Image (cartoon, helix red, strand yellow):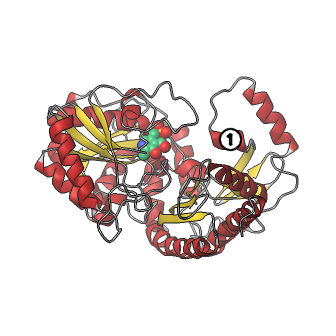
């Protein structure tokens, strides 16, 4: 498969032939939402109806063609309908769709491949079909490994929408009540360093990671019953707005966890499998977790996720009744295996590192010239632009975030944000030309919003 399999289809995007969302989109959306409820704010703010996708291109039912800056929602990272991955799924869809958790030839190959890319001895694996199920399994595995039952996670975390997952997450953002989000007993949250909005700083004004770690230590001693099974972390807070902690945070957190025999559980459902230029985002800081979960990019759109623990703790998976109905079905294994092979064959990690630098350079320039851009953040293709009303007060500018989202979408950019942090998750196959095109649409939209609010 040539590396630029997607380029021909992308020629000429964005191409808008109607107002957007177009007339057909509006009708289909209205018909659907007579019955379908509970849609994301992204869809509510821009009710377009998509018909097809190929590589970095999306086409709606009115024939408008968009540049993709979202990869579904961090999912189709190798491009929509990657021919190799689509073929692998199609092959097993005609041969063997589900056979519980019996071994299949494609599962054998996937296990070998996964073990070869995991750092350290992370090679005791179970497969699931959504991120939340993998997170649930990780929580049960942490209890089985440690014989302890408490969990600590961080403000602004997101880990899925089951009971244990919402117990580790900040589901409430102020605008809606999340009735399913009550935290279960034994789940705690602590602040986590956000370099743009530090809670504790040193005398020179820089963020004080030690103060966070020291607070955690006090919290473990005073706020728990001394039974903490795991520290649950996102390597980057994705839903929270692409928030990266300072470089010394994870190594220091790992030391603290070792001191109190607390497992480090790294939820890479959003950030893993190449999105930041490494297989695991935690690899950037040379930290090997005890437990890791994958999802989203793992099957490039086919629902397949994984929970992995260290070899020495593999027995725990025997204790938690780890298997499921769909986890590891042949189509899922084929999608995941083909995706991992594509990452290697197309040198994706390198592309992410190189084009990722381009993204950050251009976003930093944007920050200098726009009064409402308070901060830009990112590693590889996991990016964010934080909009504020005032660079000194840093007051979040939610209204601007929504308007920029809609304006850029109308220009032909299919993307994610809905709050004041403009989250971006472009397909990892993207080159500088299209990266620049997407940022142009965003920058033009920011300029228009600044004018609307009398900035400049
Ligand atoms: C870090 C993280 N964990 C878990 C999940 C849940 O995954 P899913 O939506 O596939 O259940 C998400 C989803 O966005 C996530 O970002």
Answer yes or no: is residue 175 visible: yes
Provide the secondary structure element on which disc 1 rests: helix
* The one of 396 and 100 positioned closer to us in this rendering: 396
Which quadrant is the N terminus positioned in?
bottom right
* Total marks placed: 1
Please give the residue where the numbered disc 1 appears in the rendered image: 43
Q: Position of residue 127 (x, y in %)?
A: 37, 39
Residue drawn 73% across the image and 28% down it: 33
Q: Is residue 383 left or right of residue 438?
A: left
**Mark 1 Cβ and ligand 1 under 8 Å apart:** no
| Crowd around label 1: few <14 · some 14–19 · many ≥20 (10 Å) | few
Q: Could one spot residue 87 in this view of the protein?
A: no
The structure residue drawn at horizontal position 57% and vertical position 44%, both measured from the top left corner, is 90
**In the rendered view, does 103 fall on the left or right side of 62?**
left
**In which quadrant of the rendered view does residue 243 lie?**
bottom left
Which quadrant: the C terminus? bottom right
Q: Is residue 268 left or right of residue 354?
A: left
Q: Is 252 rendered above or below residue 221? A: below
Image side of residue 235 versus residue 425, left or right = left
Above or below for 362 versus 74: below
Residue shown at 38%/64% (left/top)? 278
Image coords of residue 207 (percent x, y): 34, 63
* Residue 447 in picture, x, y percent from top left: 73, 66
Residue 100, percent across and down? 39, 29
């Amino acid at each position: 498969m040539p590396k630029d399999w997607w380029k021909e289809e992308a020629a000429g995007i964005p191409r808008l032939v109607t107002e957007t969302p177009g007339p057909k989109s509006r009708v289909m959306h209205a018909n659907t939402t007579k019955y379908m409820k509970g849609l994301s704010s992204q869809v509510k703010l821009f009710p377009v109806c998509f018909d097809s996708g190929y590589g970095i291109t999306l086409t709606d039912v009115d024939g408008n063609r968009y540049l993709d800056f979202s990869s579904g929602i961090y999912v189709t990272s190798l491009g929509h309908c990657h021919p190799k991955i689509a073929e692998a799924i199609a092959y097993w869809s005609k041969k063997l769709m589900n056979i519980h958790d019996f071994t299949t030839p494609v599962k054998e190959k996937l296990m070998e491949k996964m073990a070869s890319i995991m750092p350290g001895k992370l090679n005791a694996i179970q497969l699931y079909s959504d991120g939340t199920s993998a997170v649930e399994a990780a929580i049960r595995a942490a209890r089985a490994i440690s014989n302890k039952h408490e969990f600590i996670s961080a403000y602004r975390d997101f880990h899925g929408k089951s009971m244990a997952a919402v117990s580790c997450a900040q589901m409430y953002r102020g605008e809606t009540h999340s009735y399913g989000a009550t935290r279960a007993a034994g789940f705690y949250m602590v602040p986590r360093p956000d370099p743009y909005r530090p809670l504790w700083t040193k005398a020179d004004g820089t963020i004080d990671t030690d103060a966070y770690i020291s607070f955690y230590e006090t919290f473990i001693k005073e706020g728990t019953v001394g039974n903490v099974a795991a520290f649950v972390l996102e390597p980057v807070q994705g839903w929270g707005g692409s928030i990266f902690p300072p470089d010394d945070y994870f190594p220091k957190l790992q030391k603290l966890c070792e001191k109190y025999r607390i497992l480090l559980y790294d939820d890479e459902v959003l950030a893993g499998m190449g999105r930041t230029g490494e297989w695991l985002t935690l690899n950037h800081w040379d930290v090997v977790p005890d437990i890791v979960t994958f999802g989203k990019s793992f099957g490039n759109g086919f629902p397949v996720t994984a929970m992995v623990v260290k070899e020495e703790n593999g027995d725990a998976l025997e204790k938690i009744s780890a298997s499921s109905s769909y986890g590891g079905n042949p189509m899922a294994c084929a999608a995941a295996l083909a995706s991992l092979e594509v990452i290697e064959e197309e040198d994706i990690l390198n592309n992410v590192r190189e084009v990722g630098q381009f993204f950050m350079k251009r976003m930093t320039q944007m920050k200098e010239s726009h009064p409402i851009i308070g901060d830009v953040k990112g590693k590889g293709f996991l990016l964010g632009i934080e909009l504020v009303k005032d660079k000194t007060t840093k007051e979040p500018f939610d209204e601007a975030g929504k308007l920029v989202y809609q304006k850029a979408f109308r220009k032909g950019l299919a993307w994610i944000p809905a709050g004041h942090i403009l989250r971006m998750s472009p397909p990892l196959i993207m080159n500088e030309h299209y990266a620049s095109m997407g940022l142009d649409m965003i920058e033009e939209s920011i300029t228009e919003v600044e004018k609307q609010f009398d900035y400049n």
